[in-house]
Image (cartoon, coloured by chain):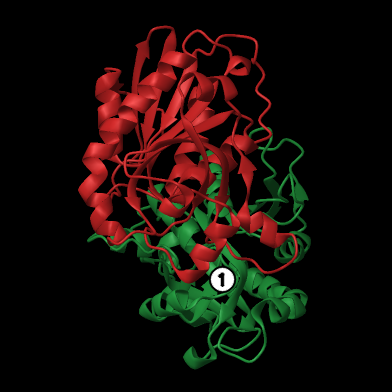
Chain colours: A green, B red
Amino acid sequence: MAAKPQHHDRPISNIVIVVAMQTEALPVVNRFQLTEDPQSPFPQGVPWVRYHGTYKDLNISLIWPGKDPALGVDSVGTISSALVTYAAIQALQPDLIINAGTAGGFKAKGASIGDIFIISDCAFHDRRIPIPVFDLYGVGLRKSFETPNLVKELNLKVAKLSTGDSLDMTQQDESSIIANDATVKDMEGAAIAYVAELLKVPAIFVKAVTDIIDGDKPTAEEFLQNLAAVTAALDVAVEQVINYINGKCVSEL
Amino acid sequence: MAAKPQHHDRPISNIVIVVAMQTEALPVVNRFQLTEDPQSPFPQGVPWVRYHGTYKDLNISLIWPGKDPALGVDSVGTISSALVTYAAIQALQPDLIINAGTAGGFKAKGASIGDIFIISDCAFHDRRIPIPVFDLYGVGLRKSFETPNLVKELNLKVAKLSTGDSLDMTQQDESSIIANDATVKDMEGAAIAYVAELLKVPAIFVKAVTDIIDGDKPTAEEFLQNLAAVTAALDVAVEQVINYINGKCVSEL
């Protein structure tokens, strides 16, 4: 991602973690003892929630898009995550965004349940616009902010991510995911990468595998079965990443 | 849409028109003699453009998401349109949003090239989440703000809209579009409806048919062929709608 933050040479002090689901968010909230902001930085009517706290030298906000006001389920997907990322950057001016969440993985590309990946590239697999150049806009391939030292020090796997608004996968989705060379598939990452790039905030992506897409089990069933256990692993990985980030400049990651 | 605007009993004074493509935007900009805002109400880095002017008793802003900074094509689709709608509502606090744009139409549902529709219902056709209640969230069915007097007076056709981020249509998209009972298909409407509902601003949708999806011609070709002629018809329809709105309260529409 062509992010050119202004303060590469200053230790990171202000982090926004964007998490789509409450089940993914709460372990991180508890681990860093974040508390819900009594005065929401967001406009009236939106369900978006900010949890906030300080940890070591860091000011941490975890932003969760909240429950859909009409239906009561997590506001997953690209539109909500793009909106909260935009609003959080405007309100909180973070030095760094971390999108942490669960994802489907492809065993053909080496993914297993519980694997944690740092994402090198994000793209969309469900925005097909077969007109020259619009086709590239639809795919929306973006490099994430590169963190070679973090990845090496924490011995984390690196993979490419493909994002779409469906939990299932059609044949056309699959072709696009293969074209994107993706090891993991989620419903938010590329949208968050898009907004972060527009507003020139470096963003990193920590994805934990809840289900094997090219395996035997139905995705929805496997996802729900593994969600709690895998979010616990995700939470440990996020703590490692935060501990590594503490005291460092963006350019040192 | 469960929009509950505060000032139903006051004449509408402040309108935001959201238009995804420059080709669709410029005829409306010219017709109302709008000029590009020298001081953008939007943050640095975003390509979003506001054209602004007064017409009769109305303060009109046309918001166009602009050209993608890296690729130079219109920033079409749900994410950009959700973001600009959010940012425009925050910055300009409109009494009413009008999303005007082109769409594909289904001849099996009575649509022809050049038809203008006012949208009664918006839903998504590419957000499949096969988990109870999440499935409904994905479809995201919303009633538009109802304008029975406007529709009757201007003798406009009314139809349901289905929105997705692809210009083409897969079998799964088609099944969802049929389930949504949609006559027209676009790439922005349901996303704009989502944001307008969150922020409780009434939104109406004016869609002009550029291509027949269940016809003989490839969508991309037919779309590009008819774009200029149909945007001229769209522009006339937007003027009729604006003239009707002028001097009226939201509750009189």
Q: In the picture provided, is B41 more to the left or to the right than B159?
A: left
Residue B149 in view (yes/no)? yes
* Chain of the residue on which disc 1 is drawn: A
**Which residue is disc 1 drawn over?**
A206
**Residue A77, image quadrant:** bottom right
At x 45%, y 60%, the residue is: A250
For the residue pair B45 and B204, the one nearer the viewer reads as B204
10 Å crowding of disc 1: few (<14), some (14-19), many (20+)? many
Residue B165 % position (x, y): 44, 57
> Which of these two is toward me, B190 or B67?
B190
Q: Give percent across and percent down for residue B182.
A: 53, 50
Point out residue A183 in the picture as x, y percentages from the top left corner.
48, 82
Q: Quadrant of the N terminus of chain B?
A: top right
Q: Is residue B201 above or below residue A152?
A: above
- Relative to B131, is A216 above or below? below
Q: Residue at x 53, y 86 (%)?
A: A106
